[in-house]
Image (cartoon, rainbow, N blue to C red):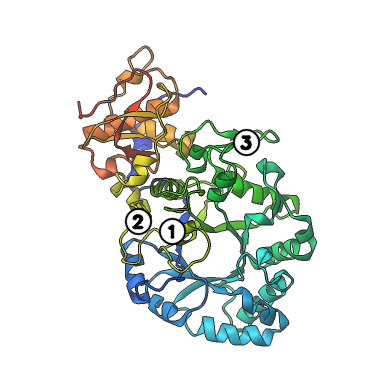
Protein backbone atom coordinates (compact mmCIF):
# COMPACT_ATOMS: atom_id res chain seq x y z
CA UNK A 1 0.00 0.00 0.00
CA UNK A 2 1.43 3.35 -1.02
CA UNK A 3 1.55 6.23 1.43
CA UNK A 4 3.49 9.43 1.93
CA UNK A 5 4.54 11.86 4.61
CA UNK A 6 2.64 14.99 3.66
CA UNK A 7 3.67 18.20 5.41
CA UNK A 8 0.66 20.40 6.06
CA UNK A 9 0.20 24.14 6.13
CA UNK A 10 0.10 25.77 9.54
CA UNK A 11 -3.69 26.14 9.69
CA UNK A 12 -4.29 22.48 8.94
CA UNK A 13 -1.64 21.49 11.46
CA UNK A 14 -3.28 23.61 14.14
CA UNK A 15 -6.65 22.03 13.45
CA UNK A 16 -5.02 18.61 13.59
CA UNK A 17 -3.04 18.91 16.81
CA UNK A 18 -5.91 20.04 19.01
CA UNK A 19 -8.01 16.91 18.70
CA UNK A 20 -4.94 14.71 19.08
CA UNK A 21 -4.08 16.29 22.39
CA UNK A 22 -7.68 15.91 23.50
CA UNK A 23 -7.73 12.21 22.63
CA UNK A 24 -9.99 11.94 19.66
CA UNK A 25 -10.87 13.00 16.13
CA UNK A 26 -13.68 10.54 15.40
CA UNK A 27 -16.56 8.96 17.21
CA UNK A 28 -15.45 6.33 19.70
CA UNK A 29 -17.41 3.63 21.40
CA UNK A 30 -18.16 3.24 25.08
CA UNK A 31 -16.96 0.70 27.64
CA UNK A 32 -19.20 -0.46 30.46
CA UNK A 33 -19.03 -3.40 32.83
CA UNK A 34 -21.30 -6.19 34.03
CA UNK A 35 -21.85 -6.17 37.79
CA UNK A 36 -22.66 -9.77 38.66
CA UNK A 37 -23.17 -10.74 42.29
CA UNK A 38 -23.10 -14.54 42.47
CA UNK A 39 -20.67 -14.47 45.38
CA UNK A 40 -20.67 -14.27 49.17
CA UNK A 41 -17.67 -12.00 49.61
CA UNK A 42 -18.37 -8.87 47.54
CA UNK A 43 -18.16 -5.29 48.82
CA UNK A 44 -21.38 -3.43 49.58
CA UNK A 45 -23.17 -1.64 46.72
CA UNK A 46 -22.09 1.84 47.98
CA UNK A 47 -18.48 0.62 48.00
CA UNK A 48 -18.92 -0.76 44.49
CA UNK A 49 -20.27 2.55 43.23
CA UNK A 50 -17.26 4.29 44.75
CA UNK A 51 -14.98 1.78 42.98
CA UNK A 52 -16.75 2.33 39.65
CA UNK A 53 -16.47 6.10 39.91
CA UNK A 54 -12.84 5.85 40.94
CA UNK A 55 -12.11 3.84 37.80
CA UNK A 56 -13.99 6.27 35.56
CA UNK A 57 -16.63 3.68 34.67
CA UNK A 58 -19.89 5.40 33.73
CA UNK A 59 -21.90 2.43 32.44
CA UNK A 60 -22.88 -0.70 34.31
CA UNK A 61 -25.15 -3.64 33.56
CA UNK A 62 -27.05 -5.65 36.17
CA UNK A 63 -28.81 -9.00 36.05
CA UNK A 64 -31.78 -7.89 38.14
CA UNK A 65 -33.28 -4.78 39.75
CA UNK A 66 -31.83 -5.15 43.25
CA UNK A 67 -33.02 -2.24 45.36
CA UNK A 68 -29.78 -1.78 47.31
CA UNK A 69 -27.78 -1.55 44.09
CA UNK A 70 -30.18 0.80 42.33
CA UNK A 71 -30.37 3.01 45.41
CA UNK A 72 -26.57 3.14 45.65
CA UNK A 73 -26.36 4.20 42.00
CA UNK A 74 -28.72 7.13 42.58
CA UNK A 75 -27.04 10.42 41.74
CA UNK A 76 -23.79 8.70 40.82
CA UNK A 77 -23.76 9.70 37.18
CA UNK A 78 -23.48 6.03 36.23
CA UNK A 79 -26.06 4.80 33.71
CA UNK A 80 -27.39 1.30 34.25
CA UNK A 81 -29.00 -1.52 32.29
CA UNK A 82 -31.33 -3.54 34.49
CA UNK A 83 -32.87 -6.93 33.81
CA UNK A 84 -36.17 -8.70 33.98
CA UNK A 85 -35.03 -12.29 34.66
CA UNK A 86 -35.99 -15.33 32.59
CA UNK A 87 -38.16 -16.75 35.33
CA UNK A 88 -40.49 -13.76 35.04
CA UNK A 89 -40.89 -13.88 31.25
CA UNK A 90 -44.07 -15.99 31.32
CA UNK A 91 -45.75 -13.57 33.70
CA UNK A 92 -44.58 -10.55 31.71
CA UNK A 93 -45.89 -12.10 28.50
CA UNK A 94 -49.26 -12.99 30.00
CA UNK A 95 -50.48 -9.42 30.37
CA UNK A 96 -49.59 -5.79 30.79
CA UNK A 97 -50.90 -5.67 34.34
CA UNK A 98 -47.81 -7.56 35.46
CA UNK A 99 -45.39 -5.31 33.56
CA UNK A 100 -47.24 -2.18 34.73
CA UNK A 101 -46.61 -3.24 38.31
CA UNK A 102 -43.05 -4.35 37.57
CA UNK A 103 -42.15 -1.06 35.91
CA UNK A 104 -43.73 0.89 38.77
CA UNK A 105 -41.78 -1.02 41.44
CA UNK A 106 -38.48 -1.65 39.67
CA UNK A 107 -38.03 1.33 37.33
CA UNK A 108 -40.06 4.34 38.39
CA UNK A 109 -39.13 3.89 42.04
CA UNK A 110 -35.52 4.77 41.09
CA UNK A 111 -35.50 6.51 37.72
CA UNK A 112 -34.40 9.20 36.86
CA UNK A 113 -32.19 9.74 39.95
CA UNK A 114 -30.77 6.37 39.06
CA UNK A 115 -30.08 6.66 35.34
CA UNK A 116 -31.74 3.52 33.97
CA UNK A 117 -30.96 3.52 30.26
CA UNK A 118 -32.27 0.09 29.22
CA UNK A 119 -34.09 -3.03 30.33
CA UNK A 120 -32.73 -6.41 29.31
CA UNK A 121 -35.79 -8.64 29.06
CA UNK A 122 -34.40 -12.08 29.81
CA UNK A 123 -30.86 -13.25 29.13
CA UNK A 124 -29.81 -15.74 26.44
CA UNK A 125 -33.40 -16.93 26.39
CA UNK A 126 -32.91 -19.27 23.43
CA UNK A 127 -30.68 -21.55 25.49
CA UNK A 128 -32.76 -21.31 28.66
CA UNK A 129 -33.46 -24.92 29.80
CA UNK A 130 -36.90 -23.78 30.94
CA UNK A 131 -37.84 -23.18 27.28
CA UNK A 132 -38.97 -19.57 27.67
CA UNK A 133 -38.37 -18.50 24.05
CA UNK A 134 -42.07 -18.29 23.22
CA UNK A 135 -42.58 -15.65 25.92
CA UNK A 136 -39.74 -13.33 24.90
CA UNK A 137 -41.24 -10.96 22.33
CA UNK A 138 -44.66 -10.66 24.04
CA UNK A 139 -42.82 -9.84 27.28
CA UNK A 140 -40.67 -7.20 25.54
CA UNK A 141 -43.77 -5.61 24.01
CA UNK A 142 -45.59 -5.50 27.35
CA UNK A 143 -42.59 -3.98 29.13
CA UNK A 144 -42.37 -1.32 26.44
CA UNK A 145 -46.12 -0.63 26.62
CA UNK A 146 -45.79 -0.12 30.36
CA UNK A 147 -42.93 2.32 29.83
CA UNK A 148 -45.09 4.21 27.35
CA UNK A 149 -47.97 4.26 29.83
CA UNK A 150 -45.73 5.80 32.48
CA UNK A 151 -44.13 8.28 30.06
CA UNK A 152 -40.54 6.98 30.14
CA UNK A 153 -40.31 4.96 26.90
CA UNK A 154 -38.34 7.71 25.17
CA UNK A 155 -35.45 7.46 27.64
CA UNK A 156 -35.36 3.72 28.41
CA UNK A 157 -34.69 1.13 25.72
CA UNK A 158 -36.01 -2.43 25.77
CA UNK A 159 -33.89 -5.27 24.39
CA UNK A 160 -32.73 -8.82 25.17
CA UNK A 161 -29.20 -10.29 25.11
CA UNK A 162 -28.71 -13.20 22.73
CA UNK A 163 -25.82 -15.65 22.69
CA UNK A 164 -23.86 -16.39 19.52
CA UNK A 165 -25.39 -19.87 19.66
CA UNK A 166 -28.45 -18.23 18.09
CA UNK A 167 -26.50 -18.32 14.82
CA UNK A 168 -26.77 -21.26 12.48
CA UNK A 169 -23.76 -20.13 10.46
CA UNK A 170 -21.01 -17.79 11.61
CA UNK A 171 -18.09 -18.52 9.25
CA UNK A 172 -17.26 -16.80 7.08
CA UNK A 173 -18.81 -13.74 8.68
CA UNK A 174 -20.61 -12.74 5.48
CA UNK A 175 -22.54 -16.04 5.62
CA UNK A 176 -23.88 -15.33 9.09
CA UNK A 177 -27.44 -16.58 9.59
CA UNK A 178 -29.78 -17.25 12.47
CA UNK A 179 -31.01 -20.74 13.29
CA UNK A 180 -33.92 -21.49 11.00
CA UNK A 181 -36.20 -22.63 13.81
CA UNK A 182 -35.82 -19.22 15.51
CA UNK A 183 -36.23 -16.89 12.55
CA UNK A 184 -39.99 -16.71 12.08
CA UNK A 185 -41.17 -17.38 15.65
CA UNK A 186 -38.86 -14.94 17.46
CA UNK A 187 -35.90 -13.38 15.60
CA UNK A 188 -37.85 -11.43 12.99
CA UNK A 189 -40.53 -10.25 15.44
CA UNK A 190 -37.83 -9.19 17.92
CA UNK A 191 -35.79 -7.31 15.31
CA UNK A 192 -38.93 -5.65 14.04
CA UNK A 193 -39.74 -4.56 17.59
CA UNK A 194 -36.23 -3.17 18.08
CA UNK A 195 -36.46 -1.26 14.81
CA UNK A 196 -39.87 0.20 15.59
CA UNK A 197 -38.86 1.32 19.08
CA UNK A 198 -35.42 2.65 18.11
CA UNK A 199 -33.65 0.11 20.29
CA UNK A 200 -30.65 -2.14 19.64
CA UNK A 201 -29.85 -5.83 19.72
CA UNK A 202 -27.83 -6.98 22.73
CA UNK A 203 -25.25 -9.66 21.93
CA UNK A 204 -23.07 -11.71 24.27
CA UNK A 205 -19.86 -12.46 22.36
CA UNK A 206 -17.02 -14.59 23.76
CA UNK A 207 -14.06 -15.30 21.44
CA UNK A 208 -12.64 -17.38 24.31
CA UNK A 209 -15.17 -20.15 23.71
CA UNK A 210 -14.54 -20.22 19.96
CA UNK A 211 -10.79 -20.34 20.56
CA UNK A 212 -11.15 -23.07 23.18
CA UNK A 213 -13.11 -25.25 20.76
CA UNK A 214 -10.82 -24.59 17.78
CA UNK A 215 -7.27 -24.13 19.03
CA UNK A 216 -6.01 -26.04 16.01
CA UNK A 217 -7.43 -23.52 13.55
CA UNK A 218 -7.78 -20.21 15.47
CA UNK A 219 -4.59 -18.45 16.48
CA UNK A 220 -4.32 -16.95 19.94
CA UNK A 221 -3.08 -13.68 18.42
CA UNK A 222 -6.29 -13.47 16.38
CA UNK A 223 -8.41 -14.11 19.48
CA UNK A 224 -6.55 -11.55 21.62
CA UNK A 225 -6.45 -8.61 19.16
CA UNK A 226 -2.70 -9.03 18.74
CA UNK A 227 -0.82 -8.44 15.51
CA UNK A 228 -1.67 -11.14 12.97
CA UNK A 229 -2.01 -11.60 9.23
CA UNK A 230 -5.78 -11.53 9.46
CA UNK A 231 -8.52 -13.75 8.08
CA UNK A 232 -10.03 -12.86 4.72
CA UNK A 233 -13.72 -13.39 4.03
CA UNK A 234 -13.72 -15.03 0.60
CA UNK A 235 -17.24 -13.78 -0.14
CA UNK A 236 -16.66 -10.04 0.17
CA UNK A 237 -12.90 -9.60 0.54
CA UNK A 238 -13.07 -8.04 4.00
CA UNK A 239 -10.09 -8.88 6.20
CA UNK A 240 -10.55 -9.50 9.91
CA UNK A 241 -7.75 -8.86 12.37
CA UNK A 242 -9.73 -10.09 15.40
CA UNK A 243 -12.12 -12.94 16.10
CA UNK A 244 -14.32 -10.54 18.07
CA UNK A 245 -15.05 -8.38 15.03
CA UNK A 246 -15.63 -11.45 12.88
CA UNK A 247 -18.21 -12.69 15.38
CA UNK A 248 -20.04 -9.36 15.45
CA UNK A 249 -20.12 -9.15 11.68
CA UNK A 250 -21.62 -12.63 11.52
CA UNK A 251 -24.53 -11.27 13.58
CA UNK A 252 -24.75 -8.16 11.40
CA UNK A 253 -24.80 -10.35 8.29
CA UNK A 254 -27.56 -12.49 9.80
CA UNK A 255 -29.61 -9.34 10.49
CA UNK A 256 -28.90 -7.98 7.01
CA UNK A 257 -30.12 -11.22 5.47
CA UNK A 258 -33.50 -10.65 7.13
CA UNK A 259 -33.68 -7.03 6.00
CA UNK A 260 -32.70 -5.40 9.29
CA UNK A 261 -29.47 -3.69 8.30
CA UNK A 262 -30.47 -0.56 10.23
CA UNK A 263 -30.75 -2.21 13.68
CA UNK A 264 -27.75 -1.36 15.83
CA UNK A 265 -25.93 -3.61 18.26
CA UNK A 266 -24.56 -3.36 21.78
CA UNK A 267 -22.16 -6.03 23.06
CA UNK A 268 -23.84 -6.79 26.37
CA UNK A 269 -21.17 -9.26 27.51
CA UNK A 270 -17.65 -10.14 26.49
CA UNK A 271 -14.56 -11.12 28.44
CA UNK A 272 -11.75 -13.61 28.99
CA UNK A 273 -11.09 -15.68 32.13
CA UNK A 274 -7.90 -15.16 34.12
CA UNK A 275 -7.91 -18.74 35.39
CA UNK A 276 -9.34 -22.04 34.21
CA UNK A 277 -9.22 -25.79 34.52
CA UNK A 278 -6.41 -27.78 32.94
CA UNK A 279 -8.44 -28.38 29.80
CA UNK A 280 -9.42 -24.70 29.41
CA UNK A 281 -6.61 -23.75 27.08
CA UNK A 282 -5.89 -20.03 27.01
CA UNK A 283 -7.53 -19.19 30.34
CA UNK A 284 -4.80 -17.19 32.06
CA UNK A 285 -4.16 -13.82 33.63
CA UNK A 286 -1.85 -12.58 30.83
CA UNK A 287 -4.35 -13.59 28.15
CA UNK A 288 -7.26 -12.00 30.02
CA UNK A 289 -5.26 -8.78 30.36
CA UNK A 290 -4.37 -8.85 26.68
CA UNK A 291 -7.93 -9.51 25.51
CA UNK A 292 -9.67 -6.95 27.69
CA UNK A 293 -6.91 -4.36 27.44
CA UNK A 294 -6.71 -4.56 23.67
CA UNK A 295 -10.50 -4.63 23.38
CA UNK A 296 -10.83 -1.44 25.43
CA UNK A 297 -8.20 0.22 23.24
CA UNK A 298 -10.04 -0.98 20.14
CA UNK A 299 -13.39 0.38 21.35
CA UNK A 300 -12.14 3.73 22.63
CA UNK A 301 -10.09 4.55 19.53
CA UNK A 302 -13.29 4.58 17.49
CA UNK A 303 -14.76 2.99 14.41
CA UNK A 304 -16.81 -0.14 13.94
CA UNK A 305 -16.42 -3.55 12.36
CA UNK A 306 -15.32 -4.22 8.77
CA UNK A 307 -18.96 -4.71 7.74
CA UNK A 308 -20.20 -1.61 9.60
CA UNK A 309 -17.10 0.58 9.90
CA UNK A 310 -18.95 3.78 10.79
CA UNK A 311 -20.83 2.41 13.80
CA UNK A 312 -18.76 2.78 16.99
CA UNK A 313 -18.81 -0.20 19.33
CA UNK A 314 -20.46 -0.09 22.75
CA UNK A 315 -19.20 -2.96 24.90
CA UNK A 316 -19.91 -4.21 28.42
CA UNK A 317 -17.03 -6.22 29.85
CA UNK A 318 -17.73 -9.32 31.86
CA UNK A 319 -17.24 -8.90 34.70
CA UNK A 320 -16.55 -6.50 37.53
CA UNK A 321 -15.62 -9.13 40.14
CA UNK A 322 -14.55 -12.74 40.34
CA UNK A 323 -17.66 -14.55 41.61
CA UNK A 324 -16.91 -17.47 43.92
CA UNK A 325 -20.37 -19.04 43.91
CA UNK A 326 -20.79 -19.46 40.18
CA UNK A 327 -21.13 -23.05 39.06
CA UNK A 328 -19.37 -24.81 36.20
CA UNK A 329 -15.68 -24.84 35.25
CA UNK A 330 -13.08 -22.80 37.09
CA UNK A 331 -13.17 -20.15 34.37
CA UNK A 332 -16.74 -19.19 35.32
CA UNK A 333 -15.51 -17.89 38.67
CA UNK A 334 -12.62 -15.93 37.18
CA UNK A 335 -13.82 -13.40 34.64
CA UNK A 336 -13.52 -10.47 37.02
CA UNK A 337 -11.35 -7.42 36.52
CA UNK A 338 -11.27 -7.07 40.32
CA UNK A 339 -11.00 -9.38 43.30
CA UNK A 340 -13.71 -8.99 45.93
CA UNK A 341 -11.23 -6.97 48.02
CA UNK A 342 -11.30 -4.40 45.15
CA UNK A 343 -7.71 -5.12 44.09
CA UNK A 344 -7.17 -5.44 40.35
CA UNK A 345 -6.72 -8.93 38.95
CA UNK A 346 -4.62 -7.26 36.25
CA UNK A 347 -4.06 -3.66 35.24
CA UNK A 348 -5.71 -2.39 32.07
CA UNK A 349 -7.00 1.05 31.00
CA UNK A 350 -10.77 1.50 31.12
CA UNK A 351 -11.09 5.09 29.88
CA UNK A 352 -9.73 7.26 27.08
CA UNK A 353 -7.48 9.03 29.58
CA UNK A 354 -6.30 5.66 30.83
CA UNK A 355 -4.99 4.75 27.39
CA UNK A 356 -2.22 7.27 28.02
CA UNK A 357 -1.77 7.22 31.78
CA UNK A 358 -1.82 3.44 32.01
CA UNK A 359 0.26 2.58 28.97
CA UNK A 360 2.72 0.47 30.94
CA UNK A 361 0.07 -1.93 32.20
CA UNK A 362 0.37 -5.67 31.94
CA UNK A 363 -1.90 -5.75 28.91
CA UNK A 364 0.59 -3.60 27.04
CA UNK A 365 3.42 -6.00 27.83
CA UNK A 366 1.75 -9.32 27.17
CA UNK A 367 -0.15 -8.16 24.12
CA UNK A 368 2.94 -8.12 21.92
CA UNK A 369 3.48 -10.83 19.32
CA UNK A 370 6.46 -13.17 19.54
CA UNK A 371 9.59 -12.57 17.54
CA UNK A 372 9.21 -13.39 13.84
CA UNK A 373 12.60 -12.49 12.46
CA UNK A 374 12.12 -8.79 11.85
CA UNK A 375 8.53 -8.67 10.60
CA UNK A 376 6.93 -5.26 11.05
CA UNK A 377 5.53 -5.11 14.52
CA UNK A 378 7.96 -7.60 16.06
CA UNK A 379 9.02 -6.81 19.63
CA UNK A 380 12.04 -8.88 20.55
CA UNK A 381 14.36 -7.19 23.04
CA UNK A 382 13.35 -6.13 26.54
CA UNK A 383 15.18 -3.35 28.35
CA UNK A 384 14.28 -2.84 31.99
CA UNK A 385 13.00 0.67 32.67
CA UNK A 386 12.96 1.72 29.01
CA UNK A 387 9.81 2.45 27.00
CA UNK A 388 9.07 3.17 23.36
CA UNK A 389 6.08 4.49 21.44
CA UNK A 390 4.70 2.52 18.47
CA UNK A 391 1.80 2.73 16.05
CA UNK A 392 -1.50 1.07 16.87
CA UNK A 393 -2.28 -0.84 13.67
CA UNK A 394 -5.92 -1.19 14.77
CA UNK A 395 -6.36 2.60 14.46
CA UNK A 396 -6.57 2.32 10.68
CA UNK A 397 -4.69 3.90 7.78
CA UNK A 398 -6.46 7.28 7.86
CA UNK A 399 -5.76 7.97 11.52
CA UNK A 400 -2.17 6.67 11.31
CA UNK A 401 -1.44 8.82 8.26
CA UNK A 402 -2.85 11.95 9.93
CA UNK A 403 -0.83 11.27 13.08
CA UNK A 404 2.31 10.63 11.03
CA UNK A 405 1.81 13.94 9.20
CA UNK A 406 1.55 15.78 12.49
CA UNK A 407 4.51 14.04 14.16
CA UNK A 408 6.83 14.76 11.24
CA UNK A 409 5.50 18.28 10.71
CA UNK A 410 4.19 20.42 13.53
CA UNK A 411 5.23 17.83 16.12
CA UNK A 412 8.94 18.18 15.33
CA UNK A 413 9.80 14.47 15.27
CA UNK A 414 13.04 13.53 13.53
CA UNK A 415 11.68 11.78 10.44
CA UNK A 416 14.85 11.91 8.35
CA UNK A 417 15.63 8.21 8.96
CA UNK A 418 12.34 7.16 7.28
CA UNK A 419 12.88 9.18 4.09
CA UNK A 420 13.70 7.25 0.86
CA UNK A 421 17.19 5.78 1.00
CA UNK A 422 17.64 6.47 4.73
CA UNK A 423 18.38 3.85 7.40
CA UNK A 424 14.78 3.26 8.47
CA UNK A 425 12.97 3.64 5.14
CA UNK A 426 12.64 -0.15 5.00
CA UNK A 427 10.33 -1.83 5.71
CA UNK A 428 8.32 0.54 3.56
CA UNK A 429 4.95 0.45 5.30
CA UNK A 430 2.80 2.89 7.21
CA UNK A 431 2.94 1.10 10.57
CA UNK A 432 6.75 0.95 10.57
CA UNK A 433 7.22 4.58 9.52
CA UNK A 434 4.56 5.87 11.89
CA UNK A 435 6.09 3.89 14.75
CA UNK A 436 9.48 5.50 14.14
CA UNK A 437 7.96 9.00 13.99
CA UNK A 438 5.77 8.47 17.06
CA UNK A 439 8.73 7.17 19.05
CA UNK A 440 10.87 10.14 18.05
CA UNK A 441 8.12 12.53 19.20
CA UNK A 442 7.70 10.53 22.44
CA UNK A 443 11.41 10.48 23.29
CA UNK A 444 11.92 14.15 22.40
CA UNK A 445 9.08 15.17 24.71
CA UNK A 446 10.42 13.37 27.74
CA UNK A 447 8.22 10.28 27.38
CA UNK A 448 5.27 12.06 28.95
CA UNK A 449 2.06 10.03 29.02
CA UNK A 450 0.28 12.42 26.64
CA UNK A 451 3.06 12.17 24.04
CA UNK A 452 2.19 8.62 23.00
CA UNK A 453 -1.48 8.66 22.13
CA UNK A 454 -2.15 10.53 18.89
CA UNK A 455 -5.90 10.05 19.27
CA UNK A 456 -5.45 6.34 19.90
CA UNK A 457 -3.04 5.82 16.99
CA UNK A 458 -0.12 4.97 19.28
CA UNK A 459 0.73 3.31 22.58
CA UNK A 460 3.70 2.62 24.84
CA UNK A 461 5.59 -0.68 24.88
CA UNK A 462 8.31 -1.95 27.16
CA UNK A 463 10.14 -4.04 24.57
CA UNK A 464 12.34 -2.59 21.87
CA UNK A 465 10.53 -2.42 18.50
CA UNK A 466 12.19 -4.36 15.72
CA UNK A 467 11.37 -3.14 12.22
CA UNK A 468 14.00 -4.72 10.02
CA UNK A 469 17.44 -3.28 10.82
CA UNK A 470 16.09 0.06 12.02
CA UNK A 471 17.21 1.02 15.53
CA UNK A 472 14.69 3.07 17.50
CA UNK A 473 16.13 5.88 19.65
CA UNK A 474 15.79 5.74 23.43
CA UNK A 475 16.43 9.44 24.03
CA UNK A 476 15.30 12.74 22.54
CA UNK A 477 18.34 12.88 20.29
Cβ atoms at labels 3 and 1 below 8 Å apart: no
Q: Callout 2: few (<14), some (14-19), or many (20+) C-alpha neighbours within 10 Å?
A: some
Q: Quadrant of the C terminus?
A: top left
Cβ atoms at labels 2 and 1 below 8 Å apart: yes
Image point 39% across, 46% down: which residue? 286
Foreground mark, 2 or 1? 1
Q: Mark 1 = which residue?
A: 334
Q: How many marks?
A: 3
Mark 3: which secondary structure?
loop
Q: Callout 1: few (<14), some (14-19), or many (20+) C-alpha neighbours within 10 Å?
A: many
Q: Position of residue 100 (x, y in %)?
A: 62, 85
Given residues 381 and 68, the one toward you in this image is 381
In primary-sequence order, the first of circles 2 and 1 is 1
Mark 2: which secondary structure?
loop
Q: Position of residue 57 (x, y in %)?
A: 38, 62
Indicate whether 317 appears above or below 278.
Answer: below
Q: Position of residue 266 (x, y in %)?
A: 56, 58
Question: Would you say 94 lies left or right of 461 here?
Answer: right
Indicate whether 74 appears above or below 2.
Answer: below
Image point 51% across, 42% down: which residue? 223
Q: Mark 3 = which residue?
A: 238
Given residues 100 and 132, the one toward you in this image is 132
Mark 1: which secondary structure?
loop
In primary-sequence order, the first of circles 2 and 3 is 3
Question: Would you say 121 lies left or right of 359 here?
Answer: right
Given residues 396 and 381, the one toward you in this image is 381
Q: Mark 2 = which residue?
A: 345
Foreground mark, 3 or 1? 1
Q: CA distance from mark 2 to mark 1?
A: 9 Å
Amino acid sequence: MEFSIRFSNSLFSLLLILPFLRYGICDSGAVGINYGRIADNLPSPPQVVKLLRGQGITKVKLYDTDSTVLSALSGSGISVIVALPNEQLASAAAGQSFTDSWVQSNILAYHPNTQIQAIAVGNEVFVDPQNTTVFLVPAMKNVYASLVKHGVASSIKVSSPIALSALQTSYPSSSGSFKSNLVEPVIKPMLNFLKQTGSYLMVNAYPFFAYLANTDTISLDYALFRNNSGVADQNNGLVYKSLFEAQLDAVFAAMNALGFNDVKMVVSETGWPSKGDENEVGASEPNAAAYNGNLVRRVLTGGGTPLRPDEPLDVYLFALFNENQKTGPTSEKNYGLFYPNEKKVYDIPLTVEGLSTNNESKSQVVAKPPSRGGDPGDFSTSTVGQTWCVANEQAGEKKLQAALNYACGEGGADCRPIQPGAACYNPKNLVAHASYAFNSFYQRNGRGSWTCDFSGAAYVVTQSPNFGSCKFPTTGG
